Image (cartoon, rainbow, N blue to C red):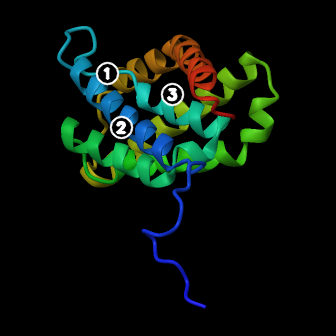
């Protein structure tokens, strides 16, 4: 009995790959939007990390929809576009993705204040990680006001980003029958 080749088998219509690809593209566009915010005088030195909110939300709700490879590509694109040292933001994003995935069951059954507190802690950890790496590379202290401003703006904008992502998620669930 001969096995069927890939062209002779029926298509797998239940594959999450198309959704993963669309979410990866949306993440890349979000990174580009984040980089474009740095052109505004208000955000010049401290653009809020909206992509971190995106990663946190998706890895909390449905970790399979945002693979680690997509997080890696988002981090590399962000570092290239923003002229950051390669690997620093990517490593921080990957760590946040892994930590959030490990806590996703607990976070999905929590109220919003617990989710916000968890995100705030993650954001502070990212800022501390980037500060330590910067100190290790350049042996001087960066502008702490800009780092504090970026961290604070990211934490304060999280509820807005969260509401937008929940709305998009609910709309996609109704349109495509996508299950969390």
Which quadrant would the N terminus be assigned to in this image?
bottom right
* For discs 3 and 1, the disc positioned in front in the rendered view: 3
The residue indicated by pointer 3 is 53
Determine which of the numbered discs, if any, sits on residue 46 in the image: 1
Q: In this view of the protein, which residue sits in the foreground, 104 or 164?
A: 164
Say above or below: 150 vs 75. Answer: above
Query: Are discs 3 and 1 less than 8 Å apart at CB?
Result: no
Examine the rendered structure and indicate whether residue 68 appears above or below residue 147: below
Front residue of 10 and 127: 10
Identify the residue at image location x=48%, y=44%: 20
Judged left or right of residue 42, residue 160 is right
Q: Earlier in the sequence, mark 3 or mark 1?
A: 1
Q: Residues within 10 Å of mark 2 (few under 14, many from 20)?
A: some
Does residue 75 appear to the left or right of 12 in the view shown?
A: left
State how far apart marks 2 and 3 are (Cα).
16 Å
Residue, disc 2:
25
Q: Position of residue 126 (x, y in %)?
A: 48, 39
Front residue of 117/76: it is 76
**Where in the figure is residue 164, as x and y percent of width and height?**
52, 14
Looking at the picture, how far across and down is residue 100, in whole percent? 64, 42
Q: Residue at x 22, y 21 (%)?
A: 36
**Residue 96 showing in the rendered view:** yes
């Amino acid at each position: 009995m001969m096995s069927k080749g890939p062209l002779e088998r029926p298509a797998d219509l239940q594959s999450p790959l198309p959704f993963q690809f669309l979410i990866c593209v949306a993440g890349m566009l979000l990174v580009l939007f984040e980089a474009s915010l740095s052109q505004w005088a208000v955000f010049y030195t401290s653009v809020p990390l909206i992509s971190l909110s995106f990663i946190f939300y998706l890895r909390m709700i449905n970790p399979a929809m945002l693979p680690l490879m997509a997080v890696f590509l988002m981090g590399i694109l962000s570092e290239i576009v923003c002229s950051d040292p390669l690997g620093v933001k990517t490593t921080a994003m990957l760590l946040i993705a892994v930590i959030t995935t490990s806590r996703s069951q607990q976070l999905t059954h929590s109220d919003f204040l617990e989710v916000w507190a968890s995100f705030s802690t993650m954001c502070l950890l990212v800022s501390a990680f980037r500060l330590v790496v910067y100190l290790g590379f350049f042996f001087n202290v960066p502008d702490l006001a800009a780092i504090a401003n970026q961290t604070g703006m990211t934490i304060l904008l999280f509820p807005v980003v969260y509401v937008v992502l929940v709305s998009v998620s609910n709309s996609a669930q109704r349109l495509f029958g996508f299950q969390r």
